[in-house]
Amino acid sequence: MLNFEGRVAIVTGGAQGIGRATVMALAERGASIGLTNIRCAKLDSTIKELEDMGRKVLKFCVDVTDVEAVQEMVEQTVATWGKIDILVNNAGITKDNLVMRMKTDEWEAVLKTNLDGAFYCIRAVLPTMVRQRYGRIINIASVVAQAGNVGQANYIASKAGIIGLTKAVAAEVARRNITVNAIAPGFINTPMTEGLPPEVKEKMLSMIPMGRMGTDSEVAQGVLFLASPETSYITGHVLNINGGMYMA
């Protein structure tokens, strides 16, 4: 089993779904966790579980679009634990609509949270990672960034941007022993997909060769893989976790 004893991780959007599964998987293997979410109350149950496990945890009620709040989060983490080894950019939102009906604020809000927020977090942690000559950055993209989907132009643009950002930063920091990779989940059972109408879910399943939706813990296993010291020669990569829905 991968061991993260002594490692420090920040996971954005860590209160539910893929983010929470990632937090728990890292903590179970020994990592100290900086846990962030825009809705502070949602963090409490996860924090209690982490503390019951005997893990060290910092709670951050952070909107990743707030540059100053992101910087303060990083500075407090470094002040507490002396370093940041792992950043998982998971925070994201959707505001689906057809392009011809999409409001400007729907477009801007999704790009700001999903893409700008990831950039702000990466920019904030890099000085620490460069100084320590070690880091693992994992950005959560999406299968639709590669395959497309109706009614999600803003979300797809943001996640395609995440893939481009991943490759650009990977090239910039590779010589500093910092890897930067992305995960593109397919259709995953999360609170975001639970409320979908049955006919929409049925259509989704018809597109997946495995015939089922994935779980947040399966995506978290991909994060663990890319966050481990053992994957030191993998960077700029997009790991598809989609049940065969998209193969490239």
Image (cartoon, helix red, strand yellow):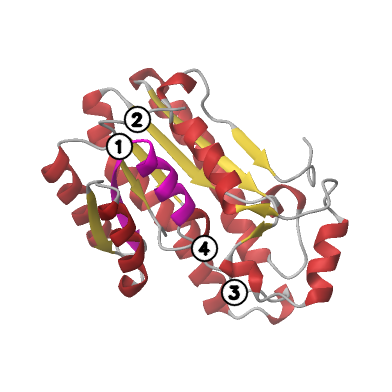
What span is colored magenta in the figure? 20-37
Check disc 2 and report the residue beneath it. Answer: 135
Task: Give whichever of 52, 110 is nearer the camera.
Answer: 52
At label 3, which amino acid type do we have? Lys
Residue 74 location in percent, x, y?
23, 48
Residue 235 location in percent, x, y?
51, 26
- In the displayed structure, would residue 118 be above or below residue 95? above
| Residue name at image x 35 percent, y 52 percent | 120
Say whether marks 4 and 3 touch (CB < 8 Å): no
Task: Give whichever of 226, 93 is nearer the camera.
Answer: 226
Q: Is residue 75 magenta?
A: no
Specify the farthest residue to the left: 79
Horizontally, residue 40 falls left or right of residue 109, namely: left
Alpha carbon separation for disc pair 3 and 2: 32 Å
- In the displayed structure, would residue 84 be above or below residue 94? above
Check disc 4 and report the residue beneath it. Answer: 111
Alpha carbon separation for disc pair 1 and 2: 8 Å
SS type, badge 4: helix
Specify the farthest residue to the front: 52
Say whether marks 1 and 2 touch (CB < 8 Å): yes
At label 1, which amino acid type do we have? Leu
Alpha carbon separation for disc pair 4 and 2: 25 Å
Q: Quadrant of residue 107?
A: bottom right
Sequence-first tag of 4 and 2: 4
Check disc 3 and report the residue beneath it. Answer: 95
| Residue name at image x 60 percent, y 45 percent | 218
In the rendered structure, find residue 126 and report the number of the disc placed on it. Answer: 1
At label 2, which amino acid type do we have? Gly
